[in-house]
Image: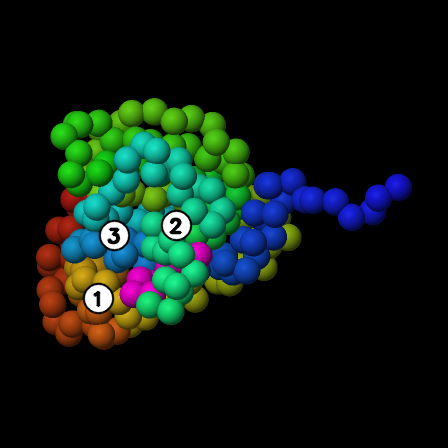
Amino acid sequence: MNRIRLLPEHVANQIAAGEVVERPASVVKELVENALDAGATRITVEVQAGGRSLIRVTDDGTGMTRDDALMCLERHATSKIQRAEDLSAISTMGFRGEALPSIASVSRMAITTRERESDSPAATQIIIHGGKMLEVKEAGAPHGTSMEVRQLFYNLPARRKFLRSEETEIRAHSSLPHACRAGASARWIHVHQGHATGLAAARRDGGQEAGCASHRVARADARAVRQ
């Protein structure tokens, strides 16, 4: 009897998730990098319970067509490179095409996206639970993309049990503008439990614009997000 066999796709994705998705902050980092690569000028990150219950990253980038939204959930599907030669001239923050299917395999995920150049008023919404696509439908949404990740590691209780504390994850999320090294400058809003905890501008040189906005503006933006 043969003992070596191919793993089912959902098992392979969960294994890959162990490398890409170590903690909620890893999810935020991957989604924010995607937003920057999409040319976003405004990125809103919402988290609940340090990212255990909810992570939602919304941007005003180029968005995706229905076909591209479906394709982005396939492993090694990417718009960043096409040939081996492209590997020596990478100018984006990500290129492997592993993050989204990995995240989708260990969470309850919803993608809502509308292409910036599209004349259609409808966006595409895809619902995926544990790597299984449940629904694809039209939805109302502005240009750009919203990635919603709920109940991270809900189907891997051993991983969920050893997640770091909520306070540790909040600090990690808030420091992400410092890690942004590429893409256009983007206004960054971080909202935790419905309250803005930070507002900064992520710059392509990896820094953070000091004093780019007041806490009063941040609170106003948080109210807009809740509405």
**The label number, if any, that marks residue 38 in the structure image:** 3
> Going from the N terminus, do you reach mark 2 or mark 3 first?
3
Neighbourhood count class around disc 1 (C-alpha, 10 Å): few under 14, some 14–19, many 20 upward: many
Residue in the picture at 26% in, 73% down: 206
The kind of residue tagged 1 is Ala
Residue in the picture at 50% in, 36% down: 129
The quarter holding residue 66 reads top left
Residue in the picture at 38% in, 69% down: 88
Q: Report whether residue 216 is seen.
A: yes
Reply above or below: 206 against 193: below
212 lies left or right of 151: left
Reply above or below: 28 against 129: below
Magenta stretch containing residue 91, yes or no? Answer: yes
Q: Secondary structure at mark 1?
A: strand
Q: Residue 13 in the image: state x and y as whole percent.
A: 56, 47
Q: Spatial distance from mark 2 to mark 1, Cα to Cα? A: 23 Å
Neighbourhood count class around disc 3 (C-alpha, 10 Å): few under 14, some 14–19, many 20 upward: many
Foreground mark, 1 or 3? 3
| Residue span colored magenta | 90-96
112 lies left or right of 72: left
> Going from the N terminus, do you reach mark 2 or mark 1 first?
2
Q: Secondary structure at mark 2?
A: loop
> Going from the N terminus, do you reach mark 1 or mark 3 first?
3
Quickly name the residue at label 2.
78
Q: Spatial distance from mark 2 to mark 3, Cα to Cα? A: 12 Å
Quickly name the residue at label 1.
202
Q: Spatial distance from mark 1 to mark 3, Cα to Cα? A: 14 Å
